[in-house]
Image: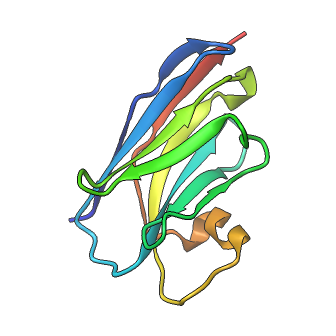
Amino acid sequence: EVQLVESGGGLVQAGGSLRLSCAASGFTFDDYAIGWFRQAPGKEREGVSCISSSNGTTYYADSVKGRFTISSDNAKNTVYLQMNSLKPEDTAVYYCAVVGLRFTSYSGSYYFRRNEYDYWGQGTQVTVSS
């Protein structure tokens, strides 16, 4: 059974930091990427960041570049999203998801297409107060 379990969300003041964790297990892709997405009330789910398992390449949405950092601990099968300088507009439910990679290369935009992802976690709430 595939499981993606997010943790680390909470309430923080603007300018503060949080670190989200995504513990992944149960999938058998030879190559894959894990992405973080978020969904604010009344808005579509959007891609935030992604990391490739094969070479550790990372991708970021323009809105979070320079503030968020994605990393992975392969020994723990866990992906982290360090979020600094948080803004009220970062308030959302944050989801991690995994996509099996079947080809040798992908465009950067591919990793932000939520419909490409195979499995999703339940999400963790992040609230940034002004």
Left or right, residue 39 beside residue 130: left
Residue found farthest to the front: 55
Left or right, residue 31 beside residue 61: left
Where residue 69 appears, as percent x and y from the top left, is 57, 42
For image coordinates 73% across by 43% down, the residue present is: 65
Where residue 108 appears, as percent x and y from the top left, is 70, 70
For image coordinates 62% across by 38% down, the residue present is: 68
Where residue 4 appears, as percent x and y from the top left, is 33, 53
Task: Say if 23 sits above or below 58 in the image.
Answer: above
Task: Say if 122 sits above or below 125 in the image.
Answer: below
The quadrant in which the N terminus is found is: bottom left
The quadrant in which the C terminus is found is: top right
Task: Say if 69 sits above or below 102 in the image.
Answer: above
Left or right, residue 12 beside residue 120: right
Q: Quadrant of residue 110?
A: bottom right
- How many numbered discs? 0
For image coordinates 39% across by 39% down, the residue present is: 21
For image coordinates 64% across by 80% down, the residue present is: 106
Residue found farthest to the right: 62
Where residue 100 appears, as percent x and y from the top left, is 44, 77
